[in-house]
Image (cartoon, rainbow, N blue to C red):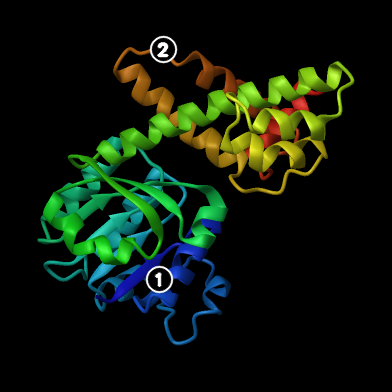
Amino acid sequence: MKAGMIGLGAMGLGMARNLAKAGYLAAVYNRTSAKTAEFPGLAYPSPEALAAVVDIVLICVSADQDVLDMIDAISTTIRPGTIVVDMSTVSSATAQLAAATLSEKNAEFLDAPVSGGVEGAKNGTLAMMVGGSAETLAKAKSVLEAMAARIVPIGAVGSGQATKAVNQIMCAGINQAVTEALGFAKSQGLDLDKVIDVISGGASGNWFLQHRGVTMTHGSFAPGFKLALHHKDLKICQTMAAHSDYPIPLADQTVLDYDQLMALGFGDEDISALYRLKSN
């Protein structure tokens, strides 16, 4: 199966590299063409050109409108039976609209957002939550396995994105808990490296503490997941929560905290930059 990758950002680039290693990558497109240089002979000048020559189109872009723009573009050239898998983080409504647009061209669609950060994209160990038909997933699965260690079918189109919203709300809560706790530890004059080491092995140990605890407390915030992108995702979560009349106060507070950090110029840092507010 020939795969085309649209979007070579922090996540998409790692995914594309793993597709290439697995022998699936046949085409790439990125709005900034310089990022396609490491894939000689595979760069296409437009998403329309890419969609015309592959069996499966993989999309990883930043925002809802970006996804819809790509869907509108590829729908002009896509062949019947082509599978489109959107791995961006967008709303369920956007996923459903994308599926409807592609169905008019007899193309298939899966919404398959991922979790695992830049490390997971690089190592091919992402968790993928998939909305769409079981038949379509079965056809795409071998390609998706080049990028993800866990591929879980959730339900109908849009359910993958709804599950990713759950993940992003949970990430906000974990970020709040870990940064606040480590800020408290600092206020107590504790050796933070030792605190992180012992707590990571106990009941409150978690991935974020293990992978970001030492870096944040040492003042390093190189992005694994950019704060501004999580802010964008949480705004989507707020809209979805409002539609279902369900309060998400931890996410709401995190949006406010991120607003403050972005105003200070820290939007391109890792989400662990929340520690900046908690450790003063």
> Which amino acid, mark 1?
Leu
Horizontal relation, residue 181 to residue 52: left or right: right
| SS class, disc 2 | loop
Image position, residue 14 (x, y; %): 51, 64
Residue that mark 2 sits on: 247
Number of marks drawn: 2
Horizontal relation, residue 280 to residue 92: left or right: right
Horizontal relation, residue 103 to residue 21: left or right: left
Closer mark to the observer between disc 1 and disc 2: 1
Front residue of 31/171: it is 171
> Which amino acid, mark 2?
Pro
Residue at 14% across / 50% down in the picture?
Answer: 134
| SS class, disc 1 | helix
Image position, residue 21 (x, y; %): 44, 76
Q: On screen, 44 above or below 136?
A: below
Horizontal relation, residue 28 to residue 274: left or right: left
Residue 273, disc: none
Which one is earlier in the sequence, the residue at label 1 or at label 2?
1
Q: On screen, 63 above or below 185?
A: below
Q: On screen, 44 above or below 273?
A: below
Residue that mark 1 sits on: 19
Q: Quadrant of the N terminus?
A: bottom left
Q: Quadrant of the C terminus?
A: top right
